[in-house]
Amino acid sequence: MASLSMITGQVKRSFAVAKKDMAIYYLKGPVIIFGLIFPFFLIVAFMLGRNVPVKDLYPGIMGMTVFFTATSVGPAIVPWEVRSMTFERLVASPVATWAILLGDTEASFCFGLIISLLTAMIAPLIGVSILHVLVFGLALVLATICFAALSILLSAYPPTDTPGNTMMLASMVKFPLVFVSGVFLPLGQMPEWGRLVAYISPLTYYTDLVRYSTDGVSYFPALVDIIALAVFTIVFMVAAIWVHEKVLTRRLT
Amino acid sequence: MTAKAIVVSDLAKNYGPLKAVDRVSFSVDAGEIFGFLGPNGAGKTTTLRMLTGIIRPDGGTASILGHDVVRDNLAAKQVRGVVPEMSNAYVDLTAWKNLLLTGELYGIPKKLTEERSERLLRQFGLYEKKDRAVKGYSKGMKQRLIICMALVSQPPLLFLDEPTSGLDVESSRLIKDIVREVNKSGTTVFLTTHNMEEASQLCDRVAIIDRGKIVAVDSPEKLKAKSKELQSIEVSFDRPIDLGGLAMADVSKTEKAGDKYRIYTGNPDAVIKRLAGFAEEKGLRIVTLNLLAPSLEDVFVELTGKGR
Ligand SMILES: Nc1ncnc2c1ncn2[C@@H]1O[C@H](COP(=O)(O)OP(=O)(O)OP(=O)(O)O)[C@@H](O)[C@H]1O
Ligand SMILES: [Mg+2]
């Protein structure tokens, strides 16, 4: 039934969905400006009132930039499209639900990746050198896919057509995740209970990987971090498709 | 036997206790224009959305061009275009971008999409405005664009949900002409409407649906002929006269409209003779005498029990 050519055909159509998302939701002045200014606010906010060399903040800044840019618009797309009835158009076209969601994920990924790459380039300016370029790059790509998938999962339930609702819900998930993820404090310096909570956040593993690529030291072995991120990505993607498909009819009636 | 484009059996959809579509069965032949005619809330849109794979039926089956709309969902969607009840182009994109997107979603090579889009936009009088965001389009322009988008994949089957509702005469006529034209080139058309005039102008056959149930399926002319007792005679005389006292067999109803009488009958021959005799007796001069065939509207009112 699901032949290879059918799957590649659907993946190709998901690019069309992503391209449309980029044009409509991402390549907008305010969205791009938010994406670009955000990391700089982070740096300033982190530096104020702290006696830490700015280069030690780099993993945290990267972690938060990737996390917040890759999840910034994603949760609003599906409800917005339901409201403007374009979601019905997508569902009516010969594109599988998974391919529509994959397209939305791809768009979040592209946006997150572009902004994060720009942020990554501040490394030499603040005296950070990247020791393991390959791991750094792989971690960045993997984490961006992971958070992009999370952003689409966050729009799945409840099946609302009000973008404000999903954005609020997304914030309620995103902010606590940041605080438990060792972006402010390396995992090794956290209390036992803090570490246990940190394990449930994908951001923990990405930040750990950035520490590994810049300082050469990390809490987990790099491979463990990478596997953890991959597992989170698959779980988010599968969960997003599963929940979205479950509530699809309810959404459209 | 002609090939079937759409086969529907026992299709059902409930909204809570409401049976929006109540075990509906019908089939549409390849090459025909099939009208789904019914009053507001009859279940037309619900049926069309099940046939186009947007919502899942609660019961029954439907297939289009041999593809089951649930099990073989993607293949079924690939072979048909849809013009939904409410306009849903991407208003932030231009008409041109909307068409290209549609082509990509149907997996059509870009070059082909561009050729077809250009031809369609010209045909629909939108070519000059193709690079404007759809936001700035009027309702009629949006509707024309939506139809272009439904045709860009050159589907063998086209669904339209009230394609002309709310449009002016010129836009409606353009859309009706195009529907006839694509049908002539071999496309099967399924459209919903509550406009009898439109249905009888366009459709080879119509199904009349009321409160979730189909009450009749036939060609517009045969439906009219079926309701023989809905033929009427319009008559007026040179001076006011009370026809009430005129006893006639075969008359189902007599109505006074202005200075005219309208007499509904299944036997116009007898009634006309009787009227002539009556005028002779009373020394009246007949000013008008018309035999009126039933309109589809009369049939519709009769079948759906509305307006009683
Ligand atoms: N999402 C929904 N939730 C609850 N009831 C619904 C929903 N959609 C439709 N209905 C009900 O189902 C019935 C059929 O609706 P439908 O939209 O199919 O009618 P229609 O024939 O298309 O009418 P119209 O001519 O007004 O477009 C109506 O009674 C309507 O109130
Ligand atoms: Mg309707």
Image: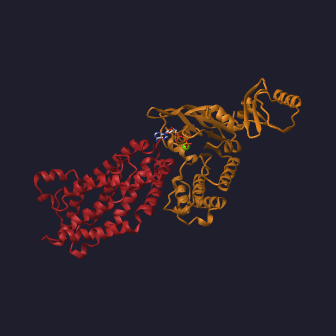
Chain letter for orange, please. B
Q: Nearer the viewer, residue B213 or B51?
A: B213
| Image quadrant where residue B95 sits | bottom right
B221 horizontally vs B27: left or right:
right
Query: Would residue B114 be visible to someone looking at this image?
Result: yes
Q: Nearer the viewer, residue A213 or A101?
A: A101
* Residue A218, percent from left and from top: 17, 60
B86 horizontally vs B207: left or right:
left
* Residue A145, percent from left and from top: 33, 57
Looking at the image, what colour scheme do you see?
by chain
Q: Colour of chain A?
A: red
Q: Nearer the viewer, residue B238 or B139?
A: B238
Report the quarter where the N terminus of chain B lies: top right
Report the quarter where the C terminus of chain B lies: top right
Question: Compared to A48, does B269 lie above or below?
Answer: above
* Residue closest to the far bottom: A125
B257 horizontally vs B215: left or right:
right
* Residue B242, percent from left and from top: 77, 32
Question: Compared to B197, does B26 lie above or below?
Answer: above
| Image quadrant where residue B218 sits | top right
* Residue B64, percent from left and from top: 58, 39
| Image quadrant where residue A50 sits | bottom left
Query: Would residue B289 be visible to someone looking at this image?
Result: no
Q: Residue at x 74, y 30 (%)?
A: B228
Q: Residue at x 46, y 49 (%)?
A: A7
| Count of numbered circles on the image | 0
Q: Nearer the viewer, residue A124 or B53?
A: B53
